[in-house]
């Protein structure tokens, strides 16, 4: 079993007559896709206006009451061991509330970036 990344494998064969042969190759193991499977607004607990989350879509919106001055998110990674993510450049942990983000009156934009841990 190979771990993530590139591994060089070398075999040397010896037959009964003393002849040798060598085989060298590389095996590269890539992580599962680095993507979110869901995102929720947890503080305050509001829903996005879209009725579903799909990682291939890039825009979601939510409307919160006027008195709401901050919010947090919970993102769920598809592969928690092979990837990491950020919200507005702040590292976040899968399945846990993010940092609170201050809101200003009007539109507020948040960007999530998901990365493979080994940057592949």
Image: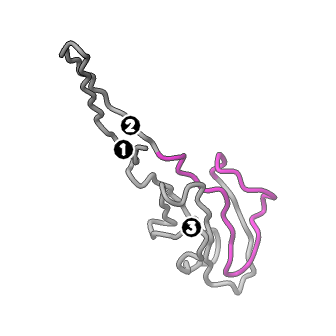
Give the percent coordinates (x, y) of residue 44: 70, 81
Distance Cα–Cα, label 1 vs label 3: 23 Å
Residue found at x 54% / y 46%: 33
Q: Residue furthest right?
A: 51
Q: Nearer the viewer, mark 3 or mark 2?
A: 2
Q: Locate residue 92 relative to residue 7 in the image: left or right.
A: right
Label 1 near label 2: C-beta < 8 Å?
A: yes
> Above or below — where is 108 with respect to 114?
below
Q: Nearer the viewer, residue 68 or 6?
A: 6
The verdict on residue 71 being magenta is no
Predominant SS of the magenta segment:
loop
SS type, badge 3 = loop
Q: Earlier in the sequence, mark 3 or mark 2?
A: 2
Give the percent coordinates (x, y) of residue 61: 70, 62
The label on residue 28 is 2
Q: Locate residue 90 relative to residue 108 in the image: left or right.
A: left
Task: Specify start and end residues of the magenta stretch as a single range.
Answer: 31-58
The verdict on residue 35 being magenta is yes
Distance Cα–Cα, label 2 vs label 1: 5 Å
Give the percent coordinates (x, y) of residue 63: 74, 71
The label on residue 94 is 3
Q: Which image quadrant: the C terminus? A: top left
Q: Nearer the viewer, mark 1 or mark 3?
A: 1
Q: Nearer the viewer, residue 78 or 106?
A: 78
> Above or below — where is 5 with respect to 106?
above
Q: Mark 3 packing: few (<14 Cα in 10 Å), some, or many (20+)?
A: many
Q: Which image quadrant: the N terminus? A: top left
């Amino acid at each position: 079993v190979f771990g993530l990344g590139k591994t060089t494998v070398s075999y040397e064969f010896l037959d009964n007559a003393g002849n040798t042969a060598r085989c060298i190759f590389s095996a590269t193991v890539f992580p599962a896709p680095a993507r979110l499977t869901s995102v929720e607004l947890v503080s305050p607990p509001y829903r996005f206006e879209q009725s579903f989350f799909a990682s291939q879509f890039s825009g979601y919106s939510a409307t919160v009451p006027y008195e709401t001055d901050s919010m947090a998110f919970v993102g769920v990674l598809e592969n928690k061991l092979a990837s990491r993510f950020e919200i507005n450049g702040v590292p976040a942990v899968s399945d846990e509330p993010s940092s609170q983000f201050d809101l200003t009156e009007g539109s507020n934009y948040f960007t999530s970036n998901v990365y493979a841990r080994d940057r592949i």
